Amino acid sequence: MDAVQVSFNRRKSKMNIAIVYILISVLSGALGQILLKKGMSGMGPLTLSVDQIGHILWQIGTNPYVVIGLSIYVGGTVFWLTALSRVDLSFAYPFASLSYVIMLIAAWQLFNESISPLRVLGTVVVGIGVFLISRS
């Protein structure tokens, strides 16, 4: 194998690993957000006020869904940072938009949210954009 082929194979392997890291990060971020939503939905609508901030922070900080959601989100950030050490930000960042697709499905399936056709179309457009960038 010549030096050009070896260099190409290393670059391709580096890129493939980075994509795996990015996808783990996106999935972790999405799962974290889903758990955060689950935890916060159980608390009902909150309003921040000076006299209630301590109580609200205590409620948030002791909610297991919130704590686990934040932990998973932080874990995903470690994979994101690792991916950024391997690829250009302009390549990696559009993949974060895949969380839109995951969130749309999760909102519909897990939280029974009404999803308009316009939201679906917008999410499809984002997905197409990510696909095009991944091909570059």
Image: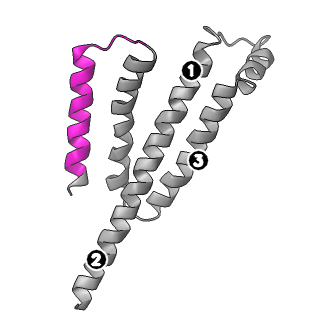
Determine the residue positioned at 56% across, 20% down.
38
Q: According to the image, what is the colour scheme of the structure?
A: one colour
Mark number, residue 9? 2
Residue tagged 3: 75
Q: Position of residue 100 (x, y in %)?
A: 36, 31
Residue tagged 1: 38
Total numbered labels placed on residues in the image: 3
Label 3 residue SS: helix
Residue 8 vertical placement versus 34 (above, below): below
Q: How packed is label 2: few (under 14 Cα within 10 Å), some, or many (20 or more)?
A: few
Q: Which residues are magenta?
A: 112-133
Assign the magenta stretch its main secondary structure: helix
Determine the residue positioned at 50% across, 39% down.
29
Corner quadrant of residue 27: top left
User: Quadrant location of the C terminus?
Assistant: bottom left
Q: Position of residue 105 (x, y in %)?
A: 35, 25
Residue 98 vertical placement versus 62 (above, below): below
Q: How packed is label 3: few (under 14 Cα within 10 Å), some, or many (20 or more)?
A: some
At label 2, which amino acid type do we have?
Asn
- Compute the Cα span from label 3 to label 1: 19 Å
Corner quadrant of residue 72: top right
Q: Is residue 32 magenta?
A: no
Determine the residue positioned at 53% across, 46% down.
76
Left or right? Give the position of 136 relative to 89. left
- Compute the Cα span from label 2 to label 1: 43 Å
